[in-house]
Image (cartoon, rainbow, N blue to C red):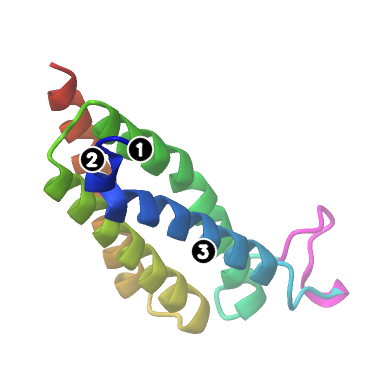
Amino acid sequence: MDGLELYSHALASLSGFALLMLVLGALSTTGRSADNRCDCGQVKRNYSDPAYRRGRAFANAIEIAGPFAMATLAAILTGSSPFLVNVFASVFLLARIAMAYVHIATEIQPLRSAFWALGTLCVAALAVTGIIGAF
């Protein structure tokens, strides 16, 4: 752990996102019925259906999990600025929590997209800091 304590917020954000994904995974299975499922078993595309939105929130979290983990770990392992890494990782987690809430509880797609963009920018910033740190 020598030196890793400087990245405590980033490491906590990785763990926090893992927990968020577990919660979203559990939520994604609720509200399914024979009436709202396709033959493949997934909920039919219908943003007014909370069950569909829960499934999409989980799928979206899965899609960004790898890039977030890779970019954060690369930034940490290359010794990038702990302040920047902690800020970007923490803002990412907060944006993803907000996005999950907006995605599941509302149909406000522009707000969901804004939180998605903020989280994606944080991942890009983490990746850039990792690249810079490598050289």
How many numbered markers are drawn?
A: 3
Q: Which mark is residue 20?
A: 3
Who comes first in sequence, dot 1 or dot 2? 1
In this view of the protein, can residue 83 be seen by the observer? yes
35 magenta-colored = yes
- Residue on which disc 1 sits: 1
Asked whether 15 or 123 is in front, the reply is 15
Q: Bounds of the magenta span?
A: 34-43
Overall secondary structure of the magenta section: loop
In this rendering, would 105 be left or right of 109?
A: right
- Helix, strand or loop at mark 3: helix
- Helix, strand or loop at mark 2: helix
Asked whether 94 or 12 is in front, the reply is 12
- Residue on which disc 2 sits: 126
- Helix, strand or loop at mark 1: loop
Q: Identify the residue shown where x is 38% and y is 43%.
A: 68
84 magenta-colored = no
Who comes first in sequence, dot 1 or dot 3? 1
Does residue 109 sit above or below 125 in this rendering? below
The percent position of residue 108, horizontal first and vertical second, equals: 38, 79
Amino acid type at circle 2 is Leu
Q: Which mark is residue 63?
A: none
Crowd class of label 1 (few under 14; some 14 to 19; many from 20; radius 10 Å): few
The CA span between labels 2 and 3 is 20 Å
Q: Identify the residue shown where x is 27% and y is 66%.
A: 114
